[in-house]
Amino acid sequence: MKALEKVSMIRSLSIALLVLTILTVNLANAELGVGVKQGDLMEYGVSYEGLPELAANFFGYEIIDVNNNVLTIKGTTNYSNGTIETENYVVDIFKNSFKDFDGFIIPSPIGEDLSFFSGDINRGDLNISSFETKEYSGANRDVAITNFSRDDSSSIYIYDRSHGVLVEYQRFESDYSLSVKLENTNLWSSKIFGIEPNYFYVLTILIVLIIGVVLFLALRKKLRS
């Protein structure tokens, strides 16, 4: 009987792991789409060298509406003299994310061979050059990096792979440099007990499944006895 119980436990755990694997594969193979929803908020710190005093030191935006691939976005910019400026954008991220919204959101999830229109005919398409794991807004995130250079100008765009939102931007010109970095967002949570949220939730599901299997086998054994 004990041998049968062990076989049953192994089978149940195998099924649980199979379900988690299927979920992971489905996420990995998801088609490109919109990785944000209404109410999502992103806030960026801005720093620079060589620009005039009246320059932005903060930029934030909120997703007001999502209609298929078209987003309605409210952007807020704070300037060093205390001026606050707001502007609404209507952006189709598959067609003009760079033209109208300076590349803050692109289609996601970002895969290995993604390229996208930069919004500038002279610049053409931008291609993802590398992937890394970096910390933004209190959590380690898988990010995609794309570089662009022309004449005396170069730019680096870094995107969160899951949501397609810009997490860092650096621009280098002959007479100034600019850096934009995501400081706050409600897209993801900070680490939980020192563990990345995604890993914590997977671990929690596994623990719950294991406890459920153990309790089920214990109850079945009790009923039989």
Image: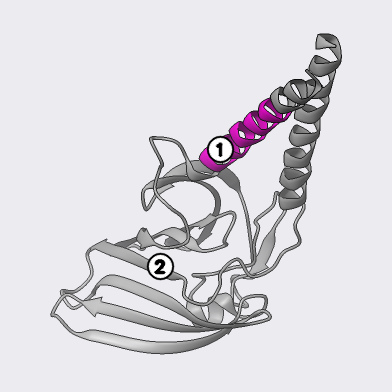
> In the drawing, does residue 184 fall left or right of residue 56?
right
Is 21 in the magenta? Answer: no
User: Pointer 1: residues within 10 angstroms few (<14), some, or many (20+)?
Assistant: few
Helix or strand or loop: what does disc 2 sit on? Answer: strand
Q: Which mark, residue 42?
A: 2
Q: Which residue appears at 51% of the width and 39% of the height? A: 200
User: Pointer 2: residues within 10 angstroms few (<14), some, or many (20+)?
Assistant: many
**Residue named by callout 1:** 204
Task: Looking at the picture, tell me which residue is in the foreground, 174 or 221.
Answer: 221
Q: Which residues are magenta?
A: 200-216
| Quarter of the C terminus within the rendering | top right
| Quarter of the N terminus within the rendering | top right
One can see residue 120 in this view: yes
Measured Cα–Cα span from mark 2 to mark 1:
28 Å
Looking at the picture, which amino acid does disc 1 mark? Thr
The colour scheme is one colour
Q: Is residue 69 above or below residue 196?
A: below
Q: Quadrant of residue 82?
A: bottom left
